[in-house]
Amino acid sequence: MAPPPAGDEAAAEVTSGLRRSVWDGILAPEEAGQALAAALAWAQRLGRKRAYDAFYVALAESRGAEFWGASRRPVNGLRHQRGPVDW
């Protein structure tokens, strides 16, 4: 696995947050890996350069919850990809 590009603080923050969740016993290492993989997959499906919204989409999907977003672009993309979504 290649390291994130220099200046990509978001990757470091997400990785750190997932690692902290593993350390605190909130997630198993496998769950953290699955969370990251799901967010990256959603970012790809939505055609997004960044995965910020994709993490929330993946979380909603994993919980069987409706996704509500404040940003039109991911919400509009989701309407074509999955079920209940609102803006």
Image: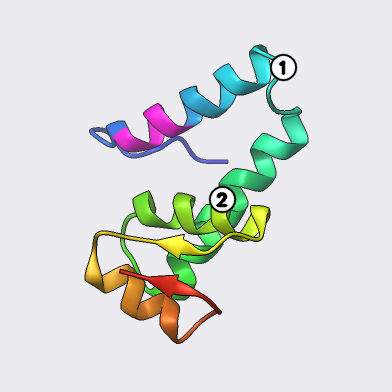
Q: Label 1: which residue? A: 25
For the point 67% across and 40% down, the residue is 33
Tell which of 60 and 9 is nearer to you. Answer: 60
Judged from the image, the secondary structure of the residue bearing numbered disc 2 is helix
For the point 23% across and 71% down, the residue is 72
Residue 73 as seen in the image, left or right of residue 18: left
For the point 61% across and 45% down, the residue is 35
Residue 32 as seen in the image, left or right of residue 50: right
The amino acid on which the numbered mark 1 sits, given as a three-letter code, is Gly
Which image quadrant for residue 73?
bottom left
Query: Residue furthest toward the bottom?
Result: 80
Residue 13 on the magenta segment: yes
Judged from the image, the secondary structure of the residue bearing numbered disc 1 is loop
Tell which of 26 and 3 is nearer to you. Answer: 26
Vertically, is 84 above or below 67?
A: below
Q: Label 2: which residue? A: 59
The amino acid on which the numbered mark 2 sits, given as a three-letter code, is Leu
The magenta span reads 10-14
Please rate how many residues cluster around mark 2, counting C-alpha atoms within 10 Å: few if below 14, some from 14 to 19, many from 20. some
Residue 87 on image: x %, y % = 30, 69
Residue 22 on image: x %, y % = 67, 21
Tell which of 24 and 2 is nearer to you. Answer: 24
Residue 50 on image: x %, y % = 32, 55
Quarter of the figure with the N terminus: top right
